[in-house]
Image (cartoon, helix red, strand yellow):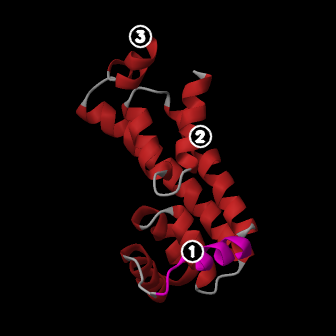
Amino acid sequence: MFLTYLIIFLLAATPFFEIMAIIPIAIVGGLPAVPVMVFAFLGNYLTISLLILFVDKIRKWRTGKKDGGNRESKRSKRAKTIWNKYGLPGLTLIGPFFVGSHLSVLLALTFGGSKRRTFVWISVSLVFWTLVLGIASVYGVDFFIGDLEDSGFLTDLLEK
């Protein structure tokens, strides 16, 4: 089981996969909700913290990789719209659902958010989304499939 939770931790730490995908997949797969939520949160939180800590170096690296074009991605445009409409709290609370938590943080800092305020808001956001996704996954499985213990494709796979 340690390896399973390590994989959950690493997948949650991966940009664009994060807690939004791993929590529902793991819970629907039959893994216990609380450990899944804890490991997924910690994985995502660790990389977000490192991103905020080293944002200046990451920005420098990112601008060095860009080719001459200044094309903005769809995700960046979506994040900019959220920023203009709702500010830092909106981008960090809504952004993880639409563009991912890593990109939300990077763009919040790029658009002018301070490291401290961004860290506080993204922390609140990650706790919120972890709880919402975990609770919705558990009750959704119970509602649609029945007993969560009997529905676990991941636990069946791990036992073989």
- As drawn, is 158 to the left or to the right of 37? left
- As drawn, is 28 to the left or to the right of 64? left
Callout 3, which amino acid? Lys
Q: Quadrant of residue 72?
A: bottom left
Secondary element type, mark 3: loop
Secondary element type, mark 1: helix
> How many marks overall?
3
Residue position for label 3: 160
Callout 1, which amino acid? Lys
Instruction: Tell me: residue 136, above or below residue 4.
Output: below
- As drawn, is 50 to the left or to the right of 13? right
* Magenta span dominant secondary structure: helix
Q: Residue at x 46, y 57 (%)?
A: 16
Callout 2, which amino acid? Phe
- Residue 65's disc is 1
First in sequence, mark 1 or 3: give its number.
Answer: 1
Residue 119 position, x and y percent, is: 69, 68
Q: Is residue 30 magenta?
A: no
Residue position for label 2: 9
Residue 104 position, x and y percent, is: 53, 70
In the displayed image of the protein, which residue is found farthest to the front? Answer: 68
- For the record, the magenta segment spans 56-68
Instruction: Tell me: residue 80, above or below residue 98.
Output: below
**Viewer-nearest residue: 137 or 143:** 137
